[in-house]
Amino acid sequence: MAKFEKVKKFISSIAPGFFMVGYVIGTGSVTTMAVAGARFGMSLTWALLLSCLFTAFLMIAISRVTIVSGNTLIYNFRKHIHPALGIFMILALSVTIISSIMGVTAIVAEVFQEWTKPITQNNSGISPVIFSFVLLGVLYLLFWKGKHQTFIRVLTIMVALMAFCFILTMIIVIPDAATLAKGLVPRIPNVGEPHMVIAGMVGTTMAGVCLVSRSTLVKEQGWKLKDLKEERRDSSISMSLTFLVSAAIIASAAGTLYIKGIHIDNAVEMLYTLEPLAGDLAISVFAMGIFSAGFSSIFPNMVLLPWLLNDYNKSEKSLKSTFYRVLVFIVAGSGLIIPLFGGKPVAIMIASQAVSPLVMPLLIGSLFYLLNNKKVIGQYKPGIIINIAVLLTFIFSIFMAAISFQGFSKLFI
C-alpha cells in the first residue's frame, strides 16, 4: 500500500509535465515534425533538440517566478513591468491560438475525409465542412456543460498510442548513426525553403501559449519553495519525452516519405508515415491518433484566451459567464474558416507555429527581468547557472525570430 501511495504521489508530481507533453504533441507538432522529416530527412533534428533544451530552462525559470511570487506570468507582467505588456502578450498569443485552431481543424477534417472514403458513396469521404461543424460543435457543447475531463483523458490515451506507434516505426526505419549525428549539427539546408519549417519546429516546442500555461499549471499545482527540485524533475521529464516523440515523428517521415521524395503538401500524405509498422492499418492508426490529437489540442486552445484574461485580472477561472461563452464560441468558430473558404492546411499549420518565435524574445527578456527583480523574487534570486541558461535561451530566441521573419518574408516576396 505504501509503494502504491509513492507511485501515486510521483505520478501526481509530474502531472503538469505530462500536460505539457500532451499539449505540445498535438496535430500541429505532428504535422510540423512530419514535414521536417519528409522534406529534409534528419537534418533539422538539431532545431528540435535545442528547442527542447531551452524550453526546459524556460519552464524552470517560469516555475520559479510563479512559485516565489505566488502569481502567474501574465499577472506579473502587468504588475511589475506594465499593463500594456500583459495585454500585448495576450493579443500576440491570441493570434497563435486562432491560427492553430484553423490549421488543426482543417488537417483533422482532411485526414478524416480520406479515412472515410471507403464507407461513402462515390468514394468521396465525409465533407470537411460537415465534419468541422460536428467537431467544433461537440467541443463547444463539452465546454458549455463542463463535462470534458474524462473525454480528454480517453483522447490522451489515443494520442499516446499514436506516439508509441511513431517510436516503434522509428526503430524500424531509423537511419544509421552517422546520419543521426549529422542531424544534430546546426545547419540550414540551402534547398526547399527550410526557414518556415525550422521556425515551426521551434514554435511548436518552445510555444508561448504552452509556457504561459505552465505558469498557470504550477500555480494550480500548489507547489512551494520546497518543491523546486520536484519542479525541475518535472520539467526535465516533460521535455525529454517531447524530444523522444517528436524525433520519432521526424525519423518515421524521413524513413518513409523522404526516401520516396514525398514532401507533404497536404495532410493526406502524412497517413503513410506509419506504414512500415502498421501496413494496411497505417491509415486507421494515424487517422485515429490525429483525430484524438485534434480534439485534445483544440479544446485547450478554445478556453485558453479566457484563462489568460483571468490571469491578467487575477480572478477565478470560471468560464460560465456570458462574455466568456461568447468569446469561446468565436474562437472555436475560427476553425471553420479553411473548410468553408479554402486554403492549404499544412502550410497554414506550419505558419501558425512559426508565429510564436517572433514574440519569444520579448517574453524571455521580460521573464529575465522578473527573475532578477527583488520586488518579485525577494531573497530567492536565481544562481548564475539559471541566469546564463535564460540568457542563452534569449540569444537562441533572437536567432529563431530572425529565421521566422525570413520564412514569412519569402511568403510575400
Image (tube, helix red, strand yellow):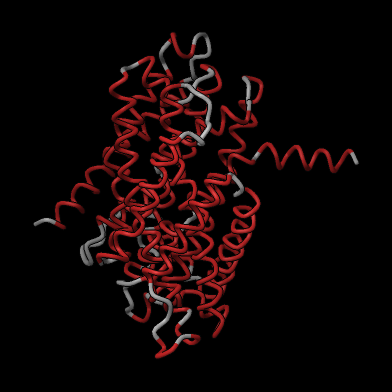
53 to 71, vertically: above or below: below
Horizontally, is 78 left or right of 252 in the view?
Answer: left
Q: For the C terminus, which image quadrant? A: bottom left
113 to 340, vertically: above or below: below
Write the residue at 57% across / 46% down.
145
**Which residue is situated farthest in the right direction here?**
1
Q: Position of residue 344 (x, y in %)?
A: 27, 66
Q: Position of residue 62 (x, y in %)?
A: 47, 28
Q: Is 22 in front, or is 369?
A: 22
Q: How many marks?
A: 0
**Which residue is situated farthest in the front direction here?**
322
56 to 299, vertically: above or below: above
Q: Position of residue 109 (x, y in %)?
A: 41, 68
Write the residue at 41% across / 30% down.
309
Query: Can residue 54 be seen from the camera position used here?
Result: no
247 to 313, vertically: above or below: below
Q: Position of residue 24 (x, y in %)?
A: 48, 50
Q: Where, by quadrant of the figure, is residue 411 drawn? A: bottom left
Q: Where, by quadrant of the figure, is residue 348 drawn? A: bottom left
Q: Is 72 in front, or is 39?
A: 72
Query: Can residue 44 be seen from the camera position used here?
Result: yes
**Which residue is situated farthest in the bottom direction here?**
122
Write the residue at 58% across / 33% down.
232
Q: Is 159 in front, or is 390?
A: 159
Q: For the N terminus, which image quadrant? A: top right
